[in-house]
Amino acid sequence: MARSIEEAQRPARGYIPPQNDKERFLMRHIEDLARTAGARGIPRYSSFLSDREQVLARAALSKAGCTCWRFEGGYPDAERRLAAIEPEGSWTDSPLACVRLDCRAAPGADLPSHRDYLGSLMGLAIKREALGDIVLPADTPGTAYVFALEPAARLICEELAQVGRAEVSCTRQPLEELPGLAQAERVLRTAAVSSLRLDAVLAAMLHCSRGAAAELIQAGRVEINHLPTGSVHAPVYEGDVFTIRGKGRFALTALPGRTKKDRQIIEFFQYQS
């Protein structure tokens, strides 16, 4: 029977400052947006941000002394979100839009996956920061909702005709008329590891040996919270997201306790591909 971990004993990953020029530019850009919005009393919006970028944006907004902001992704459970800086009394001029895609697959053919949709959208030369979440509701197979910046949404409606091997029709979807959307149901899994070292945790998630996990790390194929790491000894924390090139993306959701043999129990899920 597992023993629970006292909250005070549970370590957490602290704030990691910008690690490269791209991240430093992002923080300066967010600060500039905040100062312009405050000085001119007009709304300003970022492009879509990953979870790591949202952490940096939050720090930049705090540094700029901005309090009139929020993250917005188009629906409550959005992962990729833009920073909306809206001074009191200003009008709302959000660039966030949504396109509904309805696919018609040939008889016997598989419907497009999340990866198929993303690949087709990137094939239109749309930058990743112009795209938010792509949601595939389980109750309407063949339908996807794509959240995007306004110019990208227009391009999708004008140019996208096929996803994978399926024909697709595109319809602008007013945000106020969206059905109830939620992220795809995630299968939570548990495993017991000898330590919260990166190689041990990845081995459990990928069902491989620690040696094989170490090879992936040392080959530069692993990121923690969108930051590359080459250390097999890197500590991991509850809430970390792991991207393994060629293997997928995983999130460590909880550390429920320890086994009778004093091995750490981890709870995690794999993102849809």
Image (tube, rainbow, N blue to C red):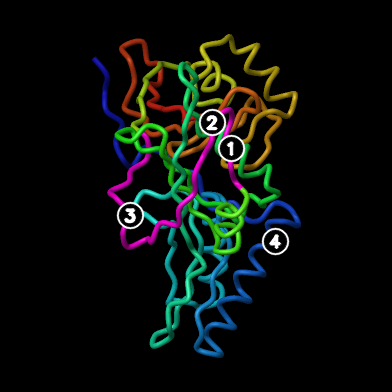
Circle 4 or circle 1, nearest the eye: 1
List the residue tagged with mark 3. 178
- Please state which amino acid type lies under the numbered disc 2: Ala
* Label 3 secondary element: loop
- Please state which amino acid type lies under the numbered disc 3: Leu
Q: Residues within 10 Å of mark 2 (few under 14, many from 20)?
A: some
* Label 4 secondary element: helix
Q: Do tag 1 and tag 3 residues touch (Cβ < 8 Å)?
A: no
Q: Quadrant of residue 123?
A: top right
Q: Residues within 10 Å of mark 3 (few under 14, many from 20)?
A: few
Residue 22 forms part of the magenta stretch:
no
Give left or right: position of 200 versus 217.
left
> Distance between the Cα atoms at labels 3 and 2?
24 Å
Question: Residue drawn at (50%, 88%), measured in percent from left and top?
Answer: 41
List the residue tagged with mark 1. 162
**Residue numbers of the magenta segment:** 160-184
- Mark number for residue 24? 4
List the residue tagged with mark 2. 166
Q: Residues within 10 Å of mark 1 (few under 14, many from 20)?
A: some
Quick one: 163 or 149, which is closer to the camera?
163
Quick one: 163 or 147, which is closer to the camera?
163
Q: Do tag 1 and tag 2 residues touch (Cβ < 8 Å)?
A: yes
Circle 4 or circle 2, nearest the eye: 2
Q: Say which label, 4 or 1, has the lower sequence index.
A: 4
46, above or below 169, in the image: below
Q: Residues within 10 Å of mark 4 (few under 14, many from 20)?
A: some
Q: Say which label, 4 or 2, has the lower sequence index.
A: 4
Circle 3 or circle 4, nearest the eye: 3
> Distance between the Cα atoms at labels 4 and 2?
41 Å
